[in-house]
Every structure is written in structure tokens, then in C-alpha cells.
Image: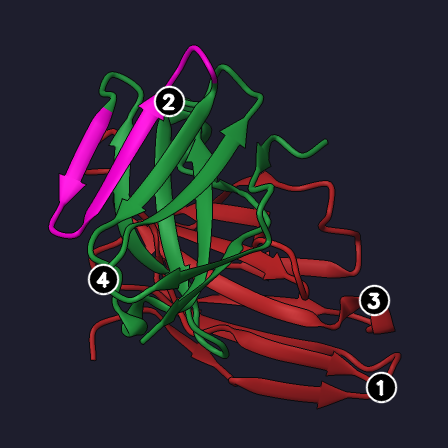
Chain colours: A red, B green
Amino acid sequence: DTGVSQDPRHKITKRGQNVTFRCDPISEHNRLYWYRQTLGQGPEFLTYFQNEAQLEKSRLLSDRFSAERPKGSFSTLEIQRTEQGDSAMYLCASSTVRSLNTEAFFGQGTRLTVV
Amino acid sequence: DQQVKQNSPSLSVQEGRISILNCDYTNSMFDYFLWYKKYPAEGPTFLISISSIKDKNEDGRFTVFLNKSAKHLSLHIVPSQPGDSAVYFCAASVNLSGGKLIFGQGTELSVKP
């Protein structure tokens, strides 16, 4: 399978704990995005990388959130001191800049539940 | 500030008939529009897109129409099939924004046999 892969698929954690999610993009894609989706809403942009450079961060991304893409391949999203409001589906997507307009391909997401 | 809006949370259509899903946007800088389909517990799957220089794009049973003056786009599915039942998201981007997508809230389509 050469699609976008996310791990884990589900995570239940206690409030105050730290969690880390991993995303492996499509291999030839140099752009990687993180989105968050809550019930009844569309995905909301969090941040994106072009190769290893983090080029934009949303205001939604508080200081407790950090994302990395150290070698321009896989990425991690860490949430420190989780809160119940962090419960959501975290989606990763990747795309290529070969053409001006190109669609992003999404992974299956990581469902986070903070109890 | 909801820049992309899908005002119909749900739509029910009979199998074989046309499904029309609508989307409105407010940011005139958007120049690329996409539709994604999402099944429960899965990530969104790309369906079809359209650049702002066009007013129509067709791919099999799916056609997207763009009306820039009205800041409105629609997705037509003809004929509708039960397997089309899913949540459909409209998304928009600005070419120079690095491909960041702004999504609508989604419309849940139910195609009944």
C-alpha cells in the first residue's frame, strides 16, 4: 500500500498525558499537512511542511502542540498535557508541488480520546 | 469566520437520480476547489477538482460546476448509487498558500435503493 499511513489509528489517554502521532506520506510527496476534525465539522488546517521546513502553523496550534518532519519524510505531531478539548480525529495529508494545483491525499487518521 | 460553507447538513436521493451538493465561499482569493468523500472512520478521499479558470469539470458520473460571480460551486452525481452514500466535503485553496485547504462542514448524502 503506497498511500498515506498514520499510526496509531486510535489513542485513548488521560488528561494531562503527552501523546505523539506519526504520519508516513506518499513517498514522492514533498508537502505534508496536519488537520484536525471534530464531530460535525470539516477538517481544520493545523500546519504544513515542505520537505523538512515547517512553513505555516495555524492559530489552532497552541504551544502544547508541536510537529516535526526531521528528514523530510515521516512527520510526528505531539500534544503535551492533553486536555479534553483535544479529543478529535487528527488527519495527515500529503501532496506534491510538481504542478501548481494538486490534490492532497489523506491518511485514515488517528482518533484521539482524552478522558 | 467560515470561509467555505455547506448549508445542507444532509441530502437524501433515490438510486439512479441526480444528487446535487452545494458549496458557497466568501474568499475571492480562492483559485482551486476540490470535493472529497468521507466514509466513517476513514480519511477523506479525493473526488474531483476545478481551477478558477474553468466553470466545469467532469469525471465519469461526477461533475463540478463553478460560478465565480456567485462564489458558488456544486457537485453533481449522475446517476446516484447506494455506494455514493457518504459525507461530502467541499474544500478551497489559494494557489500561493502552499496547498492549505479550507473545508466546509460537509453534507451527508444518503442514496436509497
Mark 1 — on which chain does it sit? A
The dot on residue A85 is 3
- Comparing marks 4 and 1, which lies closer to the viewer? 4
- Looking at the rendered image, the quarter that the N terminus of chain B falls into is top right
Callout 1: 10 Å neighbours few (<14), some, many (20+)? few
**Side of A105 relative to A88 (left or right):** left
- Comparing marks 3 and 4, which lies closer to the viewer? 4
Q: Check contact, mark 2 vs mark 3: CB within 8 A.
A: no
Mark 4 — on which chain does it sit? B
Instruction: Report, in whole angstroms, how far the alpha carbon at label 1 lies from the one at label 3.
Output: 10 Å
The dot on residue B31 is 2
Q: Does residue A52 appear in the picture of this structure?
A: yes
Mark 2 — on which chain does it sit? B
Element assignment for label 2: loop
Identify residue type, mark 2.
Answer: Asp
Instruction: Report, in whole angstroms, how far the alpha carbon at label 2 lies from the one at label 4.
Output: 32 Å
Q: Which residue is mark 1?
A: A115
Q: Is residue B64 magenta?
A: yes
Q: Which residue is mark 4?
A: B16
Q: Which of the 4 image quarters holds residue B69?
A: top left
Q: Residue at x 51, y 84 (%)?
A: A9
Which of the pair A66/B64 is nearer the observer?
B64
Q: Which residues are magenta?
A: B56-70
Which of the pair B68/A111 is nearer the observer?
B68
Element assignment for label 1: loop
Callout 4: 10 Å neighbours few (<14), some, many (20+)? some
Q: Residue at x 68, y 66 (%)?
A: A39
Decide: is B100 above or below B96: below
Q: Residue furthest top?
A: B69
